[in-house]
Image (cartoon, grey):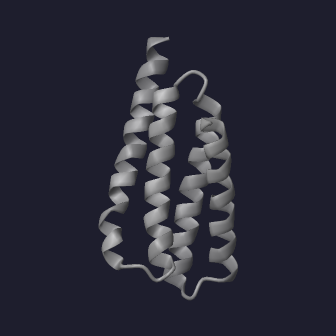
Amino acid sequence: MLGMLAAISAALAVAAGAFGAHGASGEQEADWLRTGGLYQLLHAVAVLAIMANARGPAIVLLAGSALFAATLYVMALGGPRWLGAVTPVGGALLIAGWLWAAWLFWQD
């Protein structure tokens, strides 16, 4: 299930990046889509790479990237700008996931 969610996340990231490049209404919106897509895609691949040995961190990375990217995507599509205050929560989850993974791999 985690692999499937990571693959769907990667597909959404590619779609967001493509929309940012070809359909966004402004430069800021395109930047939000590009940034969200980049973080989401990189973390989807990371989840696929570590999920067998670090399942907990992989789940946190997937959740963090989804929250981080989703808030940017919604703002890019005209949603409320206050969502920008939620974006760092996703970033904090990403940092936590990476630190947790580092700790697990250090213990190996």
Asked if residue 86 lies left or right of residue 75, the reply is left
Say which residue appears at 35% left-offset and 70% top-offset: 83
Image height of 28 relative to 105, above or below = below
In the rendered image, residue 46, in percent from the top left (x then y), is placed at 60, 39
Say which residue appears at 42% left-offset and 36% top-offset: 97
In the rendered image, residue 1, in percent from the top left (x then y), is placed at 62, 36
Say which residue appears at 65% left-offset and 37% top-offset: 3
Image height of 23 relative to 11, above or below = below
Q: Residue furthest front?
A: 1
In the rendered image, residue 24, in percent from the top left (x then y), is placed at 60, 83
Front position in the image: 108 or 58: 58
Image height of 98 relative to 80, above or below = above
Tell me where residue 22 sits by quadrant: bottom right
Q: Residue furthest top?
A: 108
Asked if residue 100 lies left or right of residue 27, the reply is left
Image height of 99 relative to 41, above or below = above
